[in-house]
Each structure stands twice: as structure tokens, then as C-alpha cells.
Image: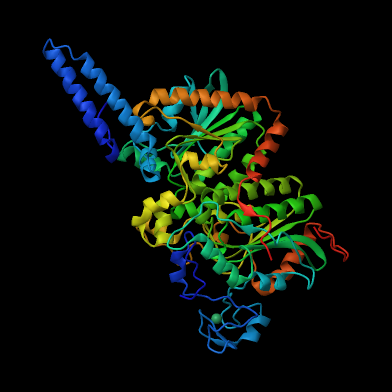
Amino acid sequence: MGRFLPDAVSLLDWFADRRKSAPAVRPIQDTEEGDGLWSKCPTCSQVVYRKDLLANASVCAGCGHHHRIDSQERLRLILDPGSFVPMDEHLAPGDPLAFRDRRAYSDRLRDSQRQTGLRDAVVCGQGRIDGLPLAIGVMEFRFMGGSMGSVVGEKLTRLIEAATASGWPVLIVCASGGARMQEGMLSLMQMAKISAALERHRQARLLYLPLLTHPTTGGVTASFAMLGDLILAEPKALIGFAGRRVIEQTLREKLPDDFQTAEYLLDHGFVDVIVPRPKLRETLASLLRLHGVQPQPEAVATP
Amino acid sequence: MARRLLLEFEKPLVDLEEQIDQIRQLARDSEVDVNQQLQQLETLAARRREEIFGSLTPAQKIQVARHPQRPSCLDFVQLLSEEWIELHGDRRGSDDKALVAGLGRLGSRPVLFLGHQKGRDTKENVARNFGMASPGGYRKALRLMQHADRFGLPIIAFIDTPGAYAGRQAEELGQGEAIAVNLRDMFALSVPVIATVIGEGGSGGALGIGVADRLLMFEHSVYTVASPEACASILWRDAAKASEAAEALRITSRDLLQLGVVDRVIDEPSGGNHWAPVKAADVLRQALEETLQELLSLDSETLRRQRYEKYRRIGHLLEDGGG
Ligand SMILES: [Zn+2]
């Protein structure tokens, strides 16, 4: 099941056995597939040269499967080269409950930090798409399943507040199993905190676009993921509030295979548009232009 | 009191009560003066009750919070307000029975009451869906909160749910979206909002009506990010570890006061609210009236700003991650 199955994530265990391990494609090779030069598609089994896969935004040329990508790669795919100015990189998680299950929370944090090079599960900053400025937050699923604790809540809130103050649109790339249980109720309250910041951003008539990627579930779905002025999603991404297994237990009924996919949500009216990853950057640029976002000449103000 | 469900740790109390009853019976049948013995036993019973309820574990508090005879949202509404007009419907095709709302009075002041509603027995619980609200419930709640906002009526919310309903239809109707919109739009309300956790607060389903200027919580209530059962099966990979999870998650009123999530803990009558519902309602009324009085002194802009700042502060992080 690979190390991308987060063992500390709410409501996610079930889909992991459903979609047998789709390891993230990263510019830095790992050894999932032998020598690391080749990658095998988990959906169609086609073997491709990793470089080719990366050149196609990590989307399988054979079947269109969207491989998981990390936050660095996501920023590279979306933003103008060199335009990203990170914010609040120094914010790090504490251990407010001194939480320990089978392992100590502090150990799990240290592992995730070592594995990702990040302090917590979101990267935030300011950047440009085709010269158009925006505030961008990208959740990192490899960091404890993208779970939302105090740091994720605080960084996204600061990001949105900065955008409101500067008149920027906001893009949040969601990938999360929901609230981080190891911080207890402090995690749940981050849902309210981020929603509050979005309310002010909305009052200022600024554009907020969440992009829902695989997977977006739990408390993230029940807060900022569903609060977009327009809601974008990646093909086949799993998006839902409750976990499939939980629902099947309550219902004793088989759910449709495509239940809680981006396509299913689109059919039910909860997603505006599904954007294949190779079209993401140009779609975002169009949307920003259509909403009157003006290009920003060089010299980005450092927050 | 009528036959009631007994929690394991309440049994010593019931044994004592039975003894007291027996002695009373004896006294009635004979001419022996047992007043002194009775008084002793009653004092003892009261002390035992204080001891037991003063040192409940989080897992035991969950049992108290879920007790079928614990006063529910509609029980409190009935005890607090002589006037009560329940209002129905989300205007989108449904009326959720698991989340009720209506107009009444707190003291002499007109208010909107709303809250999750559980049932007392299986039949009622099926009708109420065990207090697990559907998207239509959250949308009804928001519709009426915005109505209250237009007419300047303070909002009094009661939280008592195991969580938002996890079902196929709930997902198809946008359970996540419904809760999310409530979280955002409750920050725009210009009237005072007071939420009280009267039983169990289950995750997003609780928060969906719980964005408030003041969050109150009954002493033995619990409020969780995920149910200890779910948490145990995910983190411990063993649902039987639920009481350990309950301990670790810090779900009690005192814990949450300390973490800055809860603003005020409301003491329960000795033995918990289910032993003395009327007394519990009196204490609740007093807490709500005091809190509301305080909030009514603020203009709406200040109210909204303080609500924002209250949530803005919640969280724990290290400003300098080092390196
Ligand atoms: Zn493929």
C-alpha cells in the first residue's frame, strides 16, 4: 500500500484500498518502480518514461489518469516561473494535546516533515499566472494526508486575509482527508476560522477558486473546499463529506462506483467545471481575466 | 422518577436510593422514628453522587451526554419559553426533523431557538434520525438565522448530535456544502448568537450551527473533532480503544475551556441533567440571559468583529519553526 497511505487521516482508509496506491509523481525520483526512470500507470498499466509523464503534467497519455503530484510540482504547473513568493513558511505545528495513539503525534510530525521538507500540510504564497496576481495555497497530501490542524488553518487564514487586504483573488488547491484528529477540537475550529476569512474576502467582492483534487474529504469539504465562488475539480478526484465505508455501513447498500467522484459531483450540481490538468493553467488564466483581474507588472511586494 | 436507563457507574446510587425507599416504607408501616437514619442515608447518597459525577472519565461523560433521558433541545425550549412556534422547511424541498427551529422567548425577549433533536426511544430516534441532520436541516437553520437577523432576533442554538448524517442522499444533496455555507454565513449575522452544547457535539455536524459569539457547554457534555469510536478505529486501528481515544482527544467541557474553544461551562445538577431537568433548565436560562445581556450591549459591527477575532485566535502553533 505504499507510504502514501496516511495512517493518521480521517475517513480515508477506505478509499485507499479501493484505489490501490497511486504514488505521487515527483521530479525527484523515488524507487517505487525499480530504477525510477519508468512509471507504471495504476489504472491502465501502461509503462511510460517518467520524463514524458512529467512533461504531460503527470497525466497518463494512455488513459488520462491523473497521478498525484506534490505541492512543489503543482506550483510549477500553475504559476509563472519564478513568480512564487512564499508566506508564513516559518509556522510550525505544536502538540497542544500531547497526543499519542499507537505513536506520538510529535513523531508522526517529524516523519512527515522529513519526508516532505515542509513544516506542515500546506504551502502558501503569492504568485502570478500569465502576469495576473493571486494568492495561492496548495495542500500537501503527503504530509499526514493533508490533514488540517492549527497550522493549515492559520496559514490559509493569513493567506486569505492578505488577499483581502491587497485585492487579490485566492486559489486553494485542496487535497485532504479532513480535520487532523491529533489536535482535537482545535482542528475542527479551523474550519470556522478559514470560513470567516473567506466571508470577508467575499464581502470585498474578490474571487475565490478552490480546486478540488484527489482526495478532498471531511472537514475540508465541509468548509473552504465548498465555498468557492466557482468550484473547480480534477478528473476522477474523490470528493465527499463522509467516507464511503461509513455510508455503506449505515445504509447496507452498495453505492455506485463513481459515487463521490468529481464527475458525480458535477452531475449533482456541486462542481462548476472539471479541468484536466494540462488545461489547468490556461483555464485559471481565463477565469482570472474574465473576472477583471489586472496584470501586475514585475516587482512583487514581499509580504 | 419513572424507570430510567441506568449507567453502570450510577448503580451504587440506585442501591442507596432503594435502601432509602425501604426505610421509608418501614417507617410508614410501623411507628418507628427513622428520620435520623433517613437523613444520614440521604446525605450519604448526595455525597456519593457528588463523588461519582465529580470524577467521571471522558468515556463516562460520553455516556452521560448521550443518556436518553438527558434533556433535549425541545425539552429545554419548552422549559425556557412559554411561547413556542416551531418553523419548518429549507424551501428546497425538505424539512429535516433532526434539526428543529422556531420562535420563542428568553425571558421577555423574542429569540430564535434552534438545535439538533434526538429522540428518547427507538421510534422517536428513527423519526429524528438520531439527531443527525441532513443538508436540508442546515439550510433550514441558515434560512431562519437569516430571518432572525433581518428582524433583530438573537439566536440561541443547542448542539446535540453524534454528527451530520452520513448517507447517500445527504452526500448527493451536498452535506459538505450545506455545512460550509453555514460556517461562512454565520459570520455575517448582525444579531447575537449563543450556542450551547447540551449533549454531544459531533464534529462538523455540530459546528454547522455552532459558530457563535459565545459557546457555552454543560459540564458533562462532550464536543469532539471525530467520534472517539471512529478515531480509535482509524488511529489505533481498533474500535475497542474508544475510551483511550476519548481521553486523548480532550473532549470535556473543562478541557475545551482550557483550550479556548468554550467560553463558559454551565454546572449541572448533582448527578447530571437527567436527574433534575427542571433545575438544569433554570441554570441554563440564567447563563443564557447573562450572556445575552452582555452581547446586547454591543453594536452589530463590534459583535461581528469580536466573533471574527474569537475564532481567529483559536489554534496552537509555533511562530518560529526554527531552521
Ligand atoms: Zn493510464
Is A235 above or below relative to A48? above
Which x, y percent locates residue A163? 76, 54
- Could you tell me which quadrant the C terminus of chain A lies in? bottom right
x and y percent of residue A283 in the render? 72, 67
Quadrant for ligand 1 reads bottom right
Residue B69 visible in the snapshot: no
Residue shown at the point (77%, 60%) measured from the top left: A134
Extreme left residue here?
B30
Out of B178 and A128, give the one closest to the viewer: A128
Which corner quadrant of the image does residue B11 belong to? top left
Report the side of B3 relative to A156 (left or right). Answer: left
Is residue A76 placed above or below B59 in the rendered structure? below
Measured from the top left, where is residue B43 in percent x and y?
29, 22
- Can you see residue A232? yes
The residue located at (34%, 36%) in the rendering is B68
- Which residue is pictured at 43% across the width and 53% down the height? B167
